[in-house]
Amino acid sequence: MSPSLESRRLLVLFGSETGCAEDVAHAVARDARRRRFAVRVSTMDDYDRARLIDEPLVVFVCSTTGQGQEPANMRRFWRFLLRKDLPRDSLDATRFAVFGLGDSAYPRFNFPAKKLFKRLLQLGAVPLVDRGDGDDQHYLGSGCRTVPSVPDLVCSPSPALLHLNSVDGALDPWSQQLWAKLDALYPLPPGTTVVPKDVLPPPTFQLLFTDSPTTDASGGANADHGSDSTPASAPAAATAGAALQN
């Protein structure tokens, strides 16, 4: 990586209850990689909070749960930001953006994103763009994009699936503003271009098939407590286990 590209570091942190905010976080990360940023994606609670002061660029994506509460996997991070002993200039070297997902039918619409944006300002962080508010009530949807526009975007089964067939009404305009700002702040060096959208990114996961038969908890092969009719010589394809590997 050339020296001019080494400074292009972006951290994407998310808080997600059903998976949709996580999908949006990964969509942001894909767009960043197309622009030659070195990107890390993590839940807010899994991230080492002590390193936040050293991050030049951070994009936060968080959903809303219950009656305006934070998702479970960002609550420790949020409590850390609320500490009264944090200096007011703790994050003055950090530029940030926040996108929230919520439902304006509820009184505390996007409260986690609103509170997070305000607290980051109080700690001296510099906003790249205005806060983005995804709304389930928007006629174009709230956060997850259509599958054809992002082939490898798969929302979690459960409530996030409700977003699969909607073109986002807030994320796309917000993303356009974000990338316009970052393109101006971090222009690509001569001879380097943005990766076209029709070029598929490298796979995130690798699917490996094993030849060993599946086993039950006691170690027995081809365990089936309801029947003893499964032959020991069943084809490997019928008993192959699949392992997901990062």
Image (spheres, rainbow, N blue to C red):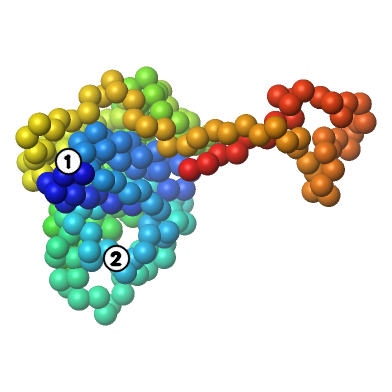
151 to the left or right of 98: right
Q: Position of residue 43 (x, y in %)?
A: 40, 53
The reply to whether residue 208 is visible in this rendering is: yes
Q: Amino acid at mark 1?
A: Leu
Q: Which badge, 1 or 2, is on the more N-terminal residue?
A: 2
Rendered image quadrant of residue 135: top left
Residue 199 at what x, y percent from top left?
Answer: 29, 23
Q: Position of residue 34 (x, y in %)?
A: 24, 33
Residue 178 position by quadrant: top left
User: Does residue 36 appear to the left or right of 43 in the view shown?
Assistant: left
The spot of residue 49 in percent (x, y) is: 34, 66
Give the class, few, some or many, for how many residues have Cα within 10 Å of label 1's Cα (few <14, many ≥20): some
Q: In the displayed structure, would residue 111 be above or below residue 184?
A: below
Q: Nearer the viewer, residue 119 or 238?
A: 238
Please give the name of the residue rendered at 16% of the width and 51% of the height, measured from the top-left corner. Answer: 7
Q: Could you tell whether 219 is left or right of 42 in the image?
A: right
The quadrant where residue 50 appears: bottom left
Local crowd at mark 2 within 10 Å, few (<14), some, or many (≥20)? few
Query: Which residue is painted at 26% across and 80% down in the image?
Result: 85
Residue at mark 1:
178
Q: Which mark is residue 236?
A: none
Number of numbered callouts drawn: 2
Q: CA distance from mark 1 to mark 2?
A: 23 Å
Q: Residue pushed farthest right?
A: 228
Which amino acid does the dot numbered 2 rest on?
A: Arg
- Can you identify the residue that label 2 sits on? 51
